[in-house]
Image (cartoon, rainbow, N blue to C red):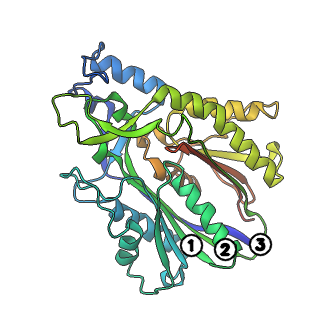
Amino acid sequence: MAIYFTGTGAYIPTENIPNADFAAHEFLNEDGSTFPYDNATVAKKFQEITGIEARRYAAPQLLTSDIATLAAEEALADAGCDRESLDYLIVAHNFGNVRADAIQTDILPSLATRVKHALGIKNPRCVAYDILFGCPGWVEGVIQAQAFIKAGMAKKCLVIGAETLSRVLDPHDRDSMIYSDGAGAAIVEEKPGEGGLLAHATLTYAAEEAYYLFFGPSFNKKLPQDVRFIKMYGRKIYEFAVSRVPEAMQQCLDASGVPIAEVNKVLIHQANEKMDEAIIHRFFKRYGQVPPAGVMPMSIHQLGNSSVATVPTLYHLLRKEKIAGQHIAPGNTLLFASVGAGMNINALVYREPN
């Protein structure tokens, strides 16, 4: 028996926001002073560093739980799964439901409960709960799902990552250009066979790293300073990620017993193209190798950073051959890795069924 992804789904919002749409923004420094470069220069430098050309925002009427439900419906259909047979429904997010015209989050009831309700699942033994774990939330949800299955507590789980980061952005902070909205989902279940989920690793660094990502006031000091937005120390996150993530990836791969030569694809959280490239090079360097061409598929260029949704969305697009020049074959070995607020890092090794 093995634990497989038997179905995947994703919701990619319809509102496409190119970098040019930020031309009219008034970007400021943290102290509220005028930023020294014009927006065209900011956008050019931003794209060179992150690789992001555009991002997707959810339509105003859609909430995080709505897009989570849409991704879940596709995953259920893809797996040919009876929704009443689900043992766990896990939703990873960080900000709950934030209406487009509001400044408060709504997490009562949980998003998982709302998704279960929207899916029409009547079975009370389908346990629905949320997980707040930063950007690695979906990967951690999968790790928990496989633990439930191994413990005999479950046979089939639905794990969703969904976020509407566009609702918690400071328009005066140029870092806001990174973030986007989206949802991805997967059915995790035990089936006869070999491979599947082979190993995992999870780490939390909560010393000086704890507040690298946080909620803070707008850079525009004329705005109410008790209204909070997502903020980050980008340079510190970069240095942390390129150092610590390759370690976790190596720990996970070594635990799986899979040699580096058999890793066909590495799916990394789509946070920043330059950062992901540095991570992948440092990871392969640990084995005295360089990354093979095409080993790291990317979706960030047009979709941006949708937090918990990047990894499941990337995997879904890869499975459905919707990323140019990328393909997953039966028996391929995939290494998933993510890093985010906490600071949390996780990884898992997965072998596709033959």
The residue closer to the viewer here, 343 or 136, is: 343
**How crowded is the residue under tag 1: few (<14 C-alpha within 10 Å), some, or many (20+)?**
many
Q: How many marks?
A: 3
What residue would you read off at disc 2? 149
Query: Which amino acid, mark 3?
Result: Gly
Query: Which amino acid, mark 1?
Result: Cys
Compute the Cα span from label 2 to label 3. 15 Å
What residue would you read off at disc 3? 193
Residue at 48%, 52% (x, y): give it: 308
Query: Are the residues tagged 2 and 1 within 8 Å (C-beta)?
Result: yes
Q: Position of residue 182 (x, y in %)?
A: 40, 53
Query: Which amino acid, mark 2?
Result: Ile
Decide which of tag 2 and tag 1 comes sooner along the chain: 2
The residue closer to the viewer here, 294 or 137, is: 137
Q: Is residue 254 above or below residue 69?
A: above
Q: Is residue 276 left or right of residue 32?
A: right
Q: Nearer the viewer, mark 2 or mark 3?
A: 2
> Which quadrant is home to the C terminus?
bottom right
Q: Position of residue 321 (x, y in %)?
A: 56, 53
What SS does tag 3 mark?
A: loop
Residue at 54%, 42% (x, y): give it: 343
Residue at 42%, 43% (x, y): give it: 303
Q: Position of residue 16 (x, y in %)?
A: 31, 43
Decide which of tag 3 and tag 1 comes sooner along the chain: 1
Compute the Cα span from label 3 to label 1. 18 Å
Q: Nearer the viewer, mark 3 or mark 1?
A: 1
What residue would you read off at disc 1? 157
